[in-house]
Image (cartoon, helix red, strand yellow):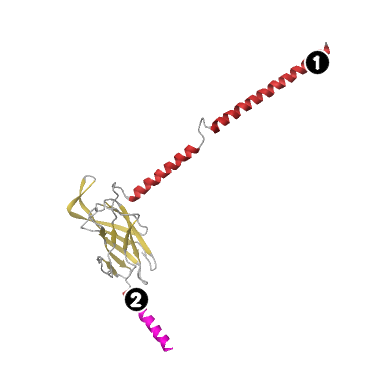
Amino acid sequence: MKASRIAAAGAVAGAAVLAVSTPCFAHVTVQPEGEAAKGGYAVVDFKVPNERDNASTTKLEVTFPTDHPLASVMPQPVEGWDIEVSKSKLDKPLEMHGEKINEAVSKVTWTAQGKGIEPGYFQKFPVSVGSLPEDADELVFKALQTYSNKEVVRWIEVPQEGQEEPDNPAPVLALSEAAEDGHSHEAADDAKDSEHAEDAAEAENASAPTAGSDEGDSGGTDTVARVLGVVGIVVGAAGVAYGVLAGRRRTTA
């Protein structure tokens, strides 16, 4: 009995320690739809879970990096949410499609029109961004999450390599290496799929009968045979009729 009580007490204590030491995984994150290659464009989703049981998330504010400003930032409309895009002047202008850009998006704010993200749910906020920097491996987006009870959670702590994840980590977008030809791997995969489709079409066309093929010759031969057969029947009938007529003439004579 005593051993059982000691074991139970140890299990409870272990669970308590685990609960305290386990980091919070339900935080605001950013992930690309597909891949986010250096020097290219990507659509990224800011995923916002509701961590409260008695309040809804009613606002999300995402600050864009100033050390690597993005010339193009276009949020996708989200039903039930108002979107505000804030811009700021750049110390060093960016060049995009041969034009100099003196300002870039510094923050995007989503505000719920109704209840927002209720307990037990999450919401994705898609944004098209580019061109992504070629001299960075990741981009850090600091975010503020506001609840209906006026509580604000600041997801602004930058994770450090080799250290434990902070309590309120900022969303971090990992950038993949660009393909050698300058195109994304996804575009290369699409090209391969198109090439395979063309090969399949050529193979199908090669197996299909064409003019002058055996099947075509067979069709022509059948047609000629049918015509000759009809002609033979007509000639035979004419011969029979001529024979009957000749016999009648001999009998009359």
Q: Nearer the viewer, residue 150 or 24?
A: 24
Q: Give the farthest residue toward the top.
A: 253
Report x, y in % for residue 34: 35, 54
Which corner quadrant holds the N terminus? bottom left
Highlighted magenta segment, given as a residue range: 1-14
Residue at the image position 26 percent from the left and 58 percent from the top: 138
Q: Amino acid at mark 1?
A: Arg
Name the spot of residue 177 as percent of width and height, x first.
28, 53
Residue 161 shown in magenta: no
Q: Are marks 1 and 2 in contact (CB under 8 Å)?
A: no
Amino acid at the residue labelled 2: Leu
Q: In percent of the image, x 57 and y 31: which residue is there?
A: 218
Looking at the image, is 80 positioned above or below residue 187?
A: below
Which residue is the extreme one toward the bottom? Answer: 2
Say which residue label 2 marks.
18
Question: 30 left or right of 65?
Answer: right
Q: Secondary structure at mark 1?
A: helix
Residue identified by numbered label 1? 248
